[in-house]
Image (tube, rainbow, N blue to C red):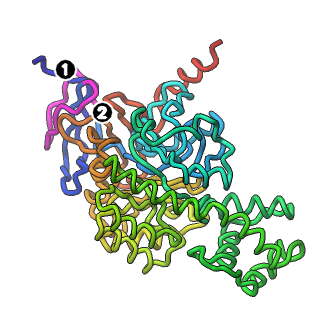
Amino acid sequence: MTKQKLDTAIVNGQIVTGDGVTEIETGNVLIGGQVILDVIAGVIDRPTNARVIDATGCKILPGIINAHAHGCTVGPTMPSGSRAFSPSVIEYHLNRHLLSGTTTLLNVCGLALTDEIATTPIDHPLEVAVSTAHTPANLAAAITVDGTGLGERHKQMTIEAMVKAGAKALGEAGGGQTLGGGAQDYRFIPDAIYKATAIRIHPNLAREIKEAVVGRKLDHAVADLNAVDDLLHGSVLQSVIDASALAELVRATVMPPVSLSLQGLAEIAEASSRLELPAIFHLATPTAETLMRLAITYPKARMIAAHSNHPSFEADECVSAARGLRTNGVTIDVSTLDCISTRWRNSPTNLDRLVLEGLVDTLSTDFAGGDWDSILDAINRMVRLGHSSLAGAVALATGNVAKALPELASDRGLIAPGRLADIAIVEGHNLSRVRHVIKKGRIVVRNGDICGRHERRQQRRRP
C-alpha cells in the first residue's frame, strides 16, 4: 500500500480532539489528501515538503457539524414549505456558517429535495446535506400555514424516495411555523397584523399576545382578553384594533396547522423506528408531552429533541422535559438561536441551565429568523463561564454529533488519524474568532476570509 503523501502540517496549537475528553496542550496535525494522517503531541521539526500552518496561540478543533439549520438550499424553506431564499441570501447564510467554523451542515427544513442542495454560489466549501419530512400530515401542515415554496415534486415525494436519494435524517417534524413557535412570533403573526393594520410589531410583543390568546401550550380554548387588552394598552396597536379582533386574528394565524403538525410528529417517529434513521423533532411546550409518548411508543426510533432550550419553556420546565426524554433514549439538542450575543428575542437562561444540569448531547444553531448566533460563540460562553470543560463543550458540536448522526458525519467530527480533515483553527483566548478553516484537507478560510471567493464571483459573471 502506498503511503499517503504529507500535504499540510498544522503545528504548535492546542488540539481539542472532539471526543469530549482529550486536549493536547501543544500538538500537531498532519494531513494528506482529504484525511488526517497523524496527530503528534509536543514540538516537532517543521516539515519542508508540505504547507505549514503555524497555530501558535490558537486552538485546533474538528470542523463544526451543525445538525439543525435552515435556509441553506434552493428548495422550500422551513417546515412551512415557504419559498426559497434568493441565491444571494443563501450565499450569505453559507458564508456565515463557514466563517464561524462550520464545515458540515444539515438543512432540516424537511421539504427540500436532495437535488436542491445549493449549487449557487458555485463550489461553495460548506458541505450541506438535507433531511426529509415528506409525510402526508407534515405536507398538509405546511400547505395549511404557507406552502408557497412547494411544487408538485415536493408534494408527491416520500420519505423512502428521499432516503434513497441521499437524505441523511428525518425531520424536522413540526416547527415554529406549524406549532406556534418562534417563526409565528417573528414572521407570521407580525405579517398578519401588518396586513390588517399597516403596523409592524416586534416579535416579543407578538409572542406575548400569542400566549395570551392560545397559551404557551396552545391549549387555551378561550383567549384571555383582559391580558390582550393590557398588552394593547400603550402599544402601537392600541388605536387600530381591539382585543377581541386581535385575538381572533392571532388564533386564525397560529392554530390551523397545529393538529396536522402534531400528527406529523407521529408519522416521523414511526418512520424512524421502521427505517432506523435519526429523526429531528420540534421540542417546545406544545410538543413535550407528545414527544414523551412517542419515545415510549417507538423505543427503536432514533429521536433527537431539537432546541430543547426553546424559549416557550420556563427553566425548570426545559430541564424536566430534557431529563424525561433523555431517560427514554432521546438525544437532547440545544440551539444557539439568538440567545448568546444577539439577544434580540431570546436569553441564554435555558441553555445555561441545561448545560449546568449535564443534559445536553448536541449543539446546533437553528435559524431564529436569521439572527442565529454561532456555535463557537455558545461554546466560548460555556467554557468562559465554567459551565463545561473545553473538551466537553467542543464535543457537543463535533464528536457527539458524529455519534448521533453517523449517516451524516461518521467520517468526521474527531481529530484522529483516518478521519476527514475538517478542521477549524480558532483564537486561543476567544473560541468564537475563527482564523482558518480546512475542509477535506483544503484551506477554505484563511485569516478570516473565504479562499477563492473572487474566483467564484468571476466564474458566475462569465456568459
Q: Residue furthest left?
A: 1
Horizontal placement of 291 versus 109: left or right?
left
Residue at 65% from the left image edge and 41% from the top image edge: 149
Kind of residue at disc 2: Ile
Q: Quick check: can you spot residue 350? A: yes
Number of the label disc, if any, that sits on residue 453: none
Where's the C terminus, which quadrant? Answer: top right
Residue 332 percent location from the top left of the image = 36, 63
Name the residue nearer the viewer: 422 or 72. 72
Residue 248 percent location from the top left of the image = 77, 72
Q: Quadrant of residue 155?
A: top right
Q: Is residue 11 magenta?
A: no
Name the residue nearer the viewer: 77 or 24. 77
Number of the label disc, if any, that sits on residue 5: 1
**Alpha carbons under labels 1 and 2: distance apart:** 17 Å
Horizontal placement of 248 versus 345: left or right?
right
Crowding near pointer 2: few (<14 within 10 Å), some, many (20+)?
Answer: some
Horizontal placement of 70 versus 461: left or right?
left
Q: Quadrant of residue 459?
A: top right
Horizontal placement of 120 versus 410: left or right?
right
Q: Give the residues in magenta.
A: 33-53
Residue at 31% from the left image edge and 48% from the top image edge: 276
Number of the label disc, if any, that sits on residue 53: 2
Crowding near pointer 1: few (<14 within 10 Å), some, many (20+)?
Answer: few
Q: Which tag, 1 or 2, sits closer to the chain's start?
A: 1
Identify whether 61 is placed above or below 117.
below
Residue 43 percent location from the top left of the image = 15, 40
Q: Quick check: can you spot residue 383? A: no
- Disc 1 on helix, strand or loop? loop
